[in-house]
Image (cartoon, rainbow, N blue to C red):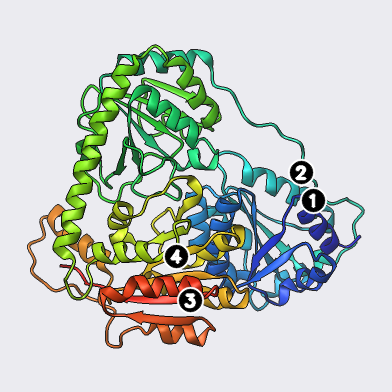
């Protein structure tokens, strides 16, 4: 059996049915083998970063290990930023790249480089296959490591001559692993004792809850103890229904900001996340004085990593939450109900405030972000999956849309931009029976605009909404923050943060890649344009002119 056959058989054994890739010469063994494996579909991309970005969100939406194939050193270099995003998203992913013939190694061939060294900083494991005998075992180990908590990408370099060598070592196959670990009962008792003694508990719900399918267990715990629920500032999934009265919103990007949001809480339980990813340094703790801090993680690396804990538990997060529901049964139902009623009143007040904000901004020209979100929601199907890279419009999005379960919303972690438009491809591949709405800023979309061609090529009926304010609005906000934090006295203009001269023409770009487009300048036209785009049943781009930084 040749190495390429071992390679393909190993993929099939591990349930790979999609390869996200950008082909090149060193990938010829894989490409030439695809006809023999019709159960594996190759999703073609025009840029390696887009391929990884799509695979990242596909892995999240499909709940399986994503598989990527790239092209030698420049191709891997193009993809590094998106691999970083997958690492931050904890997406189980095997990334491969064709490598030059190993017999050319001392001749410094065209496109040659140490691929394993390039990928190592942004992966859990990085290796080059040196002989065909290693292909099956290395790929088997790659899938194992990628899926182990905390999940993430691994990298395997595939020299072209190794793929054509003969070997008697069989393909790698997955083992029957039962990895759902139960929590230490003593840890659950310790946590429950602290929760029962708390007057105002809060929970920070990380992405791991969504990945583990533990959102319903979290809802049960929240209803049992009457806790407020927060999301991290950056998150890839929603681990709690946003219409629930206990949902409070998203946390700030600095420790004092988080501390202000948690000021009324005397206990905080963090579940399944890095806690916390900050943008700005500021001294102090994110927890108010005297607050008890608890944490549940599926792997030891994150537990007590940044903060001393009053109790910490390593276990499958769903199993731990279920155990806490039982252990917290001693709390009076009346107490929990009173807490939830208070939270509901806060939520209603915030909803009224948002309504007043939208009304105040309703007639502004260009369209305000608040109204744009209201109109987009009005035009989109109720069951649409939202793929989000709105950045400065994110708060308006969450105040406008309701997300019931983890499969309703996908976004990127790590802060790298361009993940939304690329990621929508992966979500649409994983969820072909639900409408997909991708909402992105104009600047962010340009990092992966080639994804439009892939949507057209594979006929993926995604509606791409581009919020065009002709600027990097987030950078303008951040330079304001920089000047304030570092006491920089300045009234200088925002340098190199405007996307004008020339203005970007998204409808024209979409047309050039086979995607129909609509440009909307008036707010009244937004909802009809969105509805028409979904009715088309084809990929469609809607460019909406919105206001810039005020």
Cα distance, mark 2 to mark 3? 39 Å
Secondary structure of residue under mark 3: strand
* Of the image marks 1 and 3, the number of the one nearer the N terminus: 1
- Foreground of the two, 75 or 540: 540
Cα distance, mark 1 to mark 3? 36 Å
Between circles 4 and 2, the one closer to the viewer is 4
* Of the image marks 4 and 3, the number of the one nearer the N terminus: 4
Report whether 220 appears left or right of 125: left
Residue underneath mark 3:
540
Where the N terminus falls, by quadrant?
A: bottom right
Q: Which mark is residue 438?
A: 4
Report whether 166 appears left or right of 11: right
Residue underneath mark 2:
174
Cα distance, mark 1 to mark 2? 7 Å
Q: Is residue 283 visible?
A: no
Residue underneath mark 1:
13
Cα distance, mark 4 to mark 2? 34 Å
Tell me the quarter of the picture where residue 36 sits. bottom right
* Of the image marks 1 and 2, the number of the one nearer the N terminus: 1
* Of the image marks 1 and 4, the number of the one nearer the N terminus: 1
Tell me the quarter of the picture where residue 290 sits. top left
**Residue 334: image location, x then y, percent:** 30, 17
Say whether marks 1 and 3 touch (CB < 8 Å): no
Say whether marks 1 and 2 touch (CB < 8 Å): yes
**In the picture shown, does residue 245 fall above or below 406?**
above
């Amino acid at each position: 059996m040749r190495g390429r056959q071992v390679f393909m058989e190993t993929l099939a054994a591990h349930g790979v049915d999609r390869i996200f890739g950008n082909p090149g010469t060193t990938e010829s063994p894989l490409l030439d083998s695809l006809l023999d494996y019709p159960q594996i579909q190759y999703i073609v991309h025009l840029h390696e970063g887009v391929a990884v970005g799509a695979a990242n969100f596909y892995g999240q939406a499909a709940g399986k290990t994503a598989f990527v194939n790239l092209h030698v050193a420049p191709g891997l270099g193009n993809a590094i930023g998106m691999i970083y995003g997958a690492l931050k998203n904890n997406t189980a992913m095997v990334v491969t790249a064709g490598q030059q013939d190993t017999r050319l190694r001392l001749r410094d061939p065209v496109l040659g480089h140490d691929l394993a060294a390039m990928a190592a900083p942004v992966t859990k494991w990085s290796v080059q296959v040196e002989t065909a005998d290693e292909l099956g075992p290395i790929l088997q180990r790659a899938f194992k490591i990628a899926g182990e908590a905390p999940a993430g990408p691994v990298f395997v370099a595939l020299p072209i001559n190794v793929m054509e060598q003969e070997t008697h070592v069989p393909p790698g196959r997955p083992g029957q692993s039962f990895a759902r670990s139960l929590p230490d009962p003593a840890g659950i008792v310790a946590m429950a004792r602290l929760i029962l003694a708390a007057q105002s508990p809060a929970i920070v719900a990380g992405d791991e809850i969504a990945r583990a399918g533990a959102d319903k267990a979290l809802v049960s715990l929240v209803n049992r103890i009457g806790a407020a629920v927060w999301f991290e500032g950056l998150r890839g999934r929603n681990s709690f229904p946003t219409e629930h009265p206990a949902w409070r919103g998203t946390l700030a990007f600095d420790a004092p900001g988080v501390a202000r949001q948690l000021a009324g809480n005397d206990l905080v339980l963090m579940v399944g996340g890095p806690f916390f990813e900050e943008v700005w340094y500021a001294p102090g703790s994110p927890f108010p004085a005297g607050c008890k801090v608890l944490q549940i993680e599926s792997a030891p690396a994150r537990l007590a990593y940044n903060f001393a804990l009053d109790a910490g538990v390593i276990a499958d997060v769903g199993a731990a939450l279920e155990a806490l529901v039982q252990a917290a049964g001693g709390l009076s139902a009346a107490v929990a109900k009173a807490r939830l009623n208070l939270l509901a009143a806060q939520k209603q007040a915030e909803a009224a405030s948002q309504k007043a904000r939208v009304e105040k901004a309703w007639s502004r020209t260009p369209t305000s972000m608040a109204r744009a979100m209201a109109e987009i929601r009005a035009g989109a199907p109720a069951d649409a999956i939202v793929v989000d890279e709105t950045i400065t419009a994110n708060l308006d999005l969450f105040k406008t849309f309701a997300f019931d379960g983890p499969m309703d919303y996908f976004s990127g972690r790590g802060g790298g931009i361009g993940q939304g438009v690329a990621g929508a491809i992966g979500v649409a591949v994983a969820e072909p029976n639900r409408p997909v709405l991708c909402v992105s800023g104009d600047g962010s979309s340009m990092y992966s605009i080639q994804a439009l061609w892939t949507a057209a090529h594979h006929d993926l009926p995604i509606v791409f909404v581009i919020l065009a304010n002709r600027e990097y609005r987030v950078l303008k906000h951040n330079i304001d923050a920089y000047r304030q934090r570092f006491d920089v006295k300045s009234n200088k203009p925002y340098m190199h943060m405007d996307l004008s001269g020339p203005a970007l023409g998204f409808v024209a770009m979409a047309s050039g890649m086979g995607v129909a487009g609509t440009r909307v300048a008036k707010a009244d036209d937004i909802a009809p344009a969105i509805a028409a785009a979904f009715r088309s049943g084809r990929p469609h781009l809607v460019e909406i002119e919105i206001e810039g930084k005020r």
